[in-house]
Image: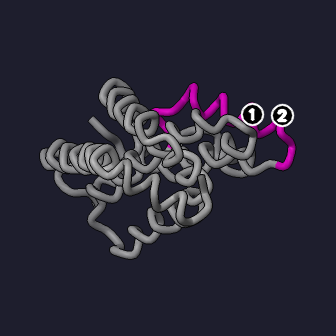
Amino acid sequence: MPTEATHANQAEPDLGERLKSPDEAVARKATAEAKKNIANVDGATICLMAYRLFLLGERDEAVFWFYAGQLRLRYYLGIYKGDPTAAGVLDAVVETFGPPINQYAFGDIPKLAKTIGDVLAWDEKTPNHIHPPLAQALPEAEWPRVRERIRSGMLDLKQMMLEQADEIRAQRKAQGID
């Protein structure tokens, strides 16, 4: 059963700052710590970790963690019944970290589809201890329904990408990306 203490990032309080460090060794150590304690790392911080991995040249791993972070952040927002502007966090994360990661990821649609499947499998077996304060969350009985709705949305994205792969490739070529 969740407790009030699990609503905040339980990893070291300065994890985000260390992920942003200009010192590559510090950032790599923070990344390793985040992965080791991932059940206690919030979705936005997972996306920050993904972005840092991308900048460090770990592009495929970055794609995985970017989608894992989005999934976890969407869960959090899906059960949060507090301030409606909190959804802006997801928009900010996607707008800040998404463009370079997605530009890379969409260059190989089958690989991205597999990665999304891997993210969903990882999520199925990996605990998630991050949730809003209980006073600001939907009743716990509703959490599984919200989780399945969000997972279904990611499956829909995967299917849409596969169905529109040729169109996506043509758009990328027209834009000079590929």
Which residue type does callout 2 highlight? Ala
Choose between 106 and 84: the one closer to the eye.
Answer: 106
Can residue 170 be seen?
yes
* Residue sitting at x 75%, y 33%: 28
Start and end of the magenta stretch? 22-41
Which residue type does callout 1 highlight? Arg
Residue 136 belongs to magenta span: no
Q: CA distance from mark 2 to mark 1?
A: 5 Å
* Residue sitting at x 64%, y 46%: 13
Residue ID for mark 2: 25
How far across and how far down the image is residue 18, in percent? Answer: 74, 45
How far across and how far down the image is residue 125, in percent? Answer: 33, 24
- The numbered mark at residue 36 is none
Can residue 75 be seen?
no
- Circle 2: element type: helix
39 sits left or right of 133 in the view: right
Residue 36 belongs to magenta span: yes
70 sits left or right of 173 in the view: left
The overriding secondary structure of the stretch rendered in magenta is: helix
Choose between 169 and 55: the one closer to the eye.
Answer: 169
| 10 Å crowding of disc 2: few (<14), some (14-19), many (20+) | few
Residue ID for mark 1: 28
How far across and how far down the image is residue 4, in percent? Answer: 37, 47
48 sits left or right of 165 in the view: right
How far across and how far down the image is residue 21, in percent? Answer: 80, 48
Instruction: Assess whether mark 1 and mark 2 are in contact (beta carbons under 8 angstroms).
Output: yes
Choose between 116 and 70: the one closer to the eye.
Answer: 116
Question: In the rendered image, which quarter is residue 82 located in?
Answer: bottom left
Residue 118 position (above or below residue 113)? above
Residue 56 position (above or below residue 170)? above
